[in-house]
Image (cartoon, grey):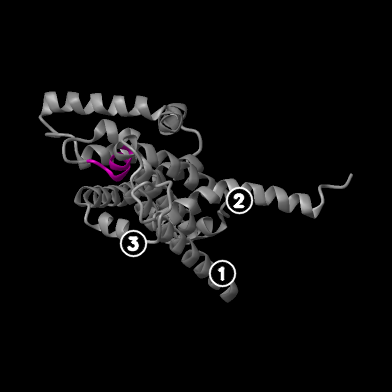
Amino acid sequence: MKGPNKTLRYAALGVGYFFLYVPILSLMVFSFNDSPVVTSWTGFSLRWYGSLFNDDALLRAAWLSFKIAALTATAATIIGTWAGYVLARMGRFKGFGLYVGMLSAPLVIPEVVLGISLLLMFVEMRGHLGWPAQNGIFTIWVGHVTLCMAFVAVVIQSRIRDMDRSLEEAALDLGATPIKVFFAITLPLIAPALASAWLLSFTLSLDDVVLASFLSGPGYSTLPMEVFSRVRLGLKPEVNALATLFILAVGTCVIIANRMQARRETQT
C-alpha cells in the first residue's frame, strides 16, 4: 500500500506551519504598527519599542521574572539531578513508592492546587515562625523549584538509564568513590541533558502565571502576571513589542546552539 504522495505531504506540512507561525508573524509585524489599535495597520513605526523601554513597571516585572527563572533553573537542576540519579541507579528501596509519588506529584497536581497548598504553608510558617515576612521572590522561587524539579528528574532519569555504565564501573574498579565517579564521570556524560533540563526549568518558571499569582506579594509582579493583567484590559502594542523581542532572543539562541552542535559533530 502506497503512502500519501509528496504533494499531499507538503500540503499537510504547509497547513501545520501556517497555523503555528502565521499568528506569531502577524504579532511581530503589528509590533511595528504606528496605530495604537493592534489590529489596524496605519504605517511603520518604532514608537512602541520606545514606549516599552520607558515602561518602568514592565521592565521591573521582566527583570524580576528573569532573576527568579535563573535561580529556579539552577536550584531545580541541582535537586532534580540528584532525584533522577536516585531513581535511575539506586533501584527499589524501602519507601521507593512514596518517593516516586512525592517526586512526580507536581507533574499531575493542577497548578491551582499546588499554589493554594504552598500559600497555606507559607501562611502557617509566618504565623508560627514569623518567616517569611511577606510573599515575594523567595516564595515564588520555592513554588517554581517545586514544580520544575519534577521535570528535571524525569529528563535526567531517562538520560542516566540510557547511559552505558561501563565507564562508571571501570572507575569504581580502579578505586574511585561513588561521589568521585558521579562528579568526574556521570556529570560530564549527562551534560547535554543537564543543559536541556536547565533551559526547560528556565522556560517553565519564566512562563508561569498561576503559581506566581498565589505566591507573589505587593510589589512583586512577574512578567506573565503584568502582561496578563494588561491583556485583560485590552491588547496593548507594547505587549507585541515585548513578545517580538522575546521571539528574536529565543530564535537567536536556538540558531547559535544548533550551529555549535553541528560544528561539534563535524569535528568529531
Q: Is residue 106 above or below residue 226?
A: above
Q: Disc 1 to disc 3, how far (Cα)?
A: 36 Å
Q: Does the rendering let one see residue 177?
A: no
Q: As rendered, which of 140 and 32 lies closer to the eye? A: 32
Density class for disc 3 (Cα within 10 Å; few <14, some 14-19, many ≥20) is: few
- x and y percent of residue 53 in the render? 25, 58
Q: Is residue 189 left or right of residue 73?
A: right
Looking at the rendered structure, the kind of residue marked 1 is Ala
- Which residue in the protein does label 2 denote? 17
Residue 262 circle label: 1
Decide: is 92 above or below 45: above
Helix, strand or loop for disc 2:
helix
**Magenta residues (range):** 221-228
Residue at coordinates 37% horizontally, 37% vertically from top-left?
A: 147
Residue 222 falls within the magenta-colored stretch: yes
- Residue 239 shows which numbered tag? none
Q: Which residue is mark 3?
A: 46
Looking at the rendering, in which quadrant would you find the N terminus? top right
Distance of mark 2 from mark 3, alpha carbons?
A: 28 Å
Give the residue type at disc 3. Leu
